[in-house]
Image (cartoon, helix red, strand yellow):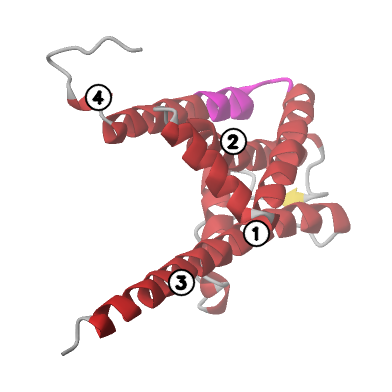
Amino acid sequence: MKPKHRSLPWLYTPAGEATYQSGIGLVTLFVFLWLALSSHNQRVVFGVSLMMYLVLLTLIAYFLRSPNLYLSEVQREVSRGGTPDFLLVGVPMGFFGSFVALTHSMATLWPGQYFRAPIDTPASSWVLYGFDNIIRATLLDFGEIFFIDVSRIDHEHNLIACTIVFSFRTILSIGLVVIVFKGWKKALGQTKETTPISRSTLP
């Protein structure tokens, strides 16, 4: 049980604890990306980021296949009085960070073979490349259709690079569909539950 501090009561509320955990996750993601993008040993970064990416990809795909299991795990953590920071913060941020580190390390180790970027591209631009793929996945290729490029980095047309980008975008696209579907299902379920009550109140 955490001792409550009088000067920071909001921090010990569920919203405050969730915000605190999200802040810790953002700082951890920033440190991880800074170390990965500035490291001189990109082979180690490649191995670590590839392992992280595959593990988190499998975990997210498993939860998307059984979204009720994911929701039950989140509810279990909340019922225990904690915050599901690993499921809600750690997994999404880790998946994003591993994708950025993996693509950057591959471009550094094998220039022009899997990912192409201008010579003067700074390492921090690979973060924008990650956001660019998020936008293209969640907005249904809005940027590509209207020629809006957030990043100048792109993948080469070979099986390995295309598979990495495809898996990243597909998980994001399916995740959005699952979230929307669950929201509609919940809304329709609540509507059906309230309909008999509203009819019973009629004269």
Q: Looking at the image, is mark 2 or mark 4 nearer the viewer?
A: 4
Residue named by callout 4: 11
Q: Is residue 119 above or below residue 81?
A: below
Q: Position of residue 135 (x, y in %)?
A: 51, 61
Quarter containing the C terminus = bottom left
Mark 1: which amino acid?
Arg
**Mark 1, residue position:** 169
Question: What amino acid is at disc 2?
Answer: Gly
Residue underneath mark 2: 94
Question: Magenta segment range?
Answer: 31-41
Q: Residues within 10 Å of mark 2 (few under 14, many from 20)?
A: many
Asked whether residue 136 appears in the rendered view, the answer is no
Q: In this rendering, is residue 56 above or below 157?
A: above
Residue at image location 34% in from the left, 27% down from the top: 20
Earlier sequence position, callout 3 versus callout 1: 1
Helix, strand or loop at mark 3: helix
Say which element carries label 4: helix
Query: Against 30, is 72 above or below?
Result: below
How far separated are the C-alphas under marks 2 and 3? 28 Å
Label 1: state its secondary structure.
helix
**Marks 2 and 1, how far apart in space?**
15 Å
Left or right of 88: which side holds 96?
right
Between the residue at mark 3 and the residue at mark 1, the CA separation in whole angstroms equals: 23 Å
Identity of the residue furthest to the right in this view: 159
Residue 12 image-quadrant placement: top left
**Is tag 2's residue or tag 3's residue first in the polypeptide sequence?**
2
Mark 3 vs mark 4: which is more N-terminal?
4
Residue at x 59% of width, y 53% of height: 68
**Among numbered discs 2 and 1, the one appearing first in the sequence:** 2
Identify the image quadrant of residue 11: top left
Mark on residue 184? 3
